Image (cartoon, rainbow, N blue to C red):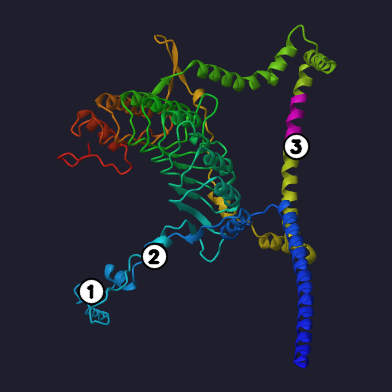
Amino acid sequence: MASTEKPNMMWTKLGIAARIKMGRKGEKSLSKDKNQSSASQDAQDEDSNKTPEPYNCSGFFQPDFTELCHRQDMTYIPQIVPRPRPPAPSPSQAAEGKPEKGKDKNKQLSAPEPDPEPLLDEDGEPVEPPPKTYTMKDKFEYFKPSIQVEMDNPDKLDTVTEVYIRGWKVDDCMMEIFKQCWPAMERLHTINLWQVGLTGETVAILASFIPLCMNLKNLILDGNSIQEGEENWHLLVDDDSSVQLLSLQHCSVSDEAAVGIGKALGTAKRFNTKLMSLNLAGNRITDVGAEHLAGGLRMNRSLLSLSLANNHIGDKGVKKIAEALSRFPLTHEEVVERRRLISEKGSPERNKSPPPSRRAESKDRPGSVRSSSHTDKDKSKRDKPSAKKNKDPKAKEEDKKGGTRKEKDDKGSSKKGFFKSFIGQLMFQNHRPASIAADAGKSVGKTKDKKVKKPTPQEQEQPDVPEVINPLMEVADYMSELKTLMVAGNRVLLNLNLSRNQITEDGVEELIKAAQYQKTLLMDNKINGTGLMRICLHKNKVSADSDELKKLNDMMAAKHPFYKPPATPDGEAV
């Protein structure tokens, strides 16, 4: 027993010693791991404290957008996908819709192709084929945020022309990313943000970089309602931006916002010259807001289309709009600005020096100082007649004869010299040396070989922009009864949509007066422009059978470009 216990004791001692060594090694490895982890954490903290280098966008929307989103540590990055389009008709459908040319119409059509056999499932029942007019997606996949784009060339990522974002929140962080991406996209001309929850801050960020998008023409922000007190839509109507179409449908635009938009359209000191179409349909604009918008139309001469449909505008607001379109009295501020412009225009003429004729007259005055050369010439002129008087009559006749001979000799010599020079040139051209002829040929060839630089397409597309005349500088009529200056109103606006409002027959009569006044000015050739060509007033508080409404519609119909007057029984147009 003693012999067996001794080796067991030895093995236990050895196991305990090995375990102690392993424990020490484990402690050392744990300490090393702790040191390495602490060092890595310190390195990460140092990297986080360092400010990252600013990212310069390259104009490729997709890589620029993803990189900027990664830098903002976004958990989900919206995908950039091409905007879906309806599928193009198949070749068979196109062939059926358009008959081939050069074939007889009476020829029998070929037999239609048989329908393919329906697919059957395991039970032998027919299976519905997949749809051809649309595609099916998972509901969660469909409602994920995405950015739809239109491109000139799908293979090139730098040819994005239109951006569509619909149905998801665009916050300040996302708008800051767009602020860096969109100005670098040279071909971008349309931005459509539908129901993206814009606020006053996001609109301010958007307005700050819109002037940097040089080719941006269309800005559509429908379905974004901002709380009252934060409405700053007028920031989008800026002189520096190149936006020509602005749509704010169903944005809950109030009268306070209309005040800012009216001032942005035009005031006595400044007016917008870029915006051509403004859509404010489906908002909360009343007569107060319409009055301020009419104030903007007084000085604006670039807006062609204005939509105020589905608002709360009555006869008072329509009266102000009609006044801005016909003629209106100038306010005190406008009169002061008009006088300032006239004085600035006339000041250069006052500072001009008098014409040379006036200078000559001033020199001939008795009190003027004249040079000695002038006095000498006058003395010589005075002495000449006296010398002529002293001559004998025979000497006078000899002088006359000699003068006529000299004139004839001069004329003959001039003719001879002309013919000699002309003949010499012909002889030189016919018998000139070969070296000179070769040099002349080279010079002619060089002129032919020179390529004339053709203008670039951008230079060809750029039309001659007419100079915009300030409305305050137009001819004004003084009304002694009212003691005011009357100026012709806006004749540039072509389309006015006032449907679905609260307009009665009184408002329609005001619009008729404005249209008649514009017509008289056009007939007298006193103004440039066409005036209103389309007014929409359906679904107001006016019956469709109203005489005033019919009269206004007839006046607008006569201005239509394709209008044809009704023919009389004799066949002549009225």
Please name the residue shown 23% across and 30% down the image: 542
Number of residues whose C-alpha sits closer than 10 Å to that of mark 2, classed few (under 14), some (14–19) or many (20 or more): few
Give the amino acid at mark 3.
Answer: Asp
Q: Which residue is mark 1?
A: 104
Q: Is residue 560 left or right of residue 427?
A: left
Q: Percent position (x, y) of residue 324?
A: 40, 25
Q: Is residue 255 left or right of residue 349?
A: left
Q: Residues within 10 Å of mark 1 (few under 14, many from 20)?
A: few
The residue that appears at 79% across and 79% down in the rendered structure is: 17
Quadrant of the drawing holding the C terminus? top left
* Residue interval drawn in magenta: 398-409
Mark 3 lies on residue? 410
Kindly identify which residue carries mark 2: 137
Q: Position of residue 431 (x, y in %)?
A: 76, 63
- For image coordinates 36% across by 35% down, the residue present is 308
- Separation of residues labelled 1 and 2 (CA atoms): 47 Å
**Mark 3: secondary structure:** helix
Distance from the alpha carbon under mark 1 to that under mark 3: 87 Å
Q: Where is residue 444 shown, x and y percent of the image?
A: 70, 61
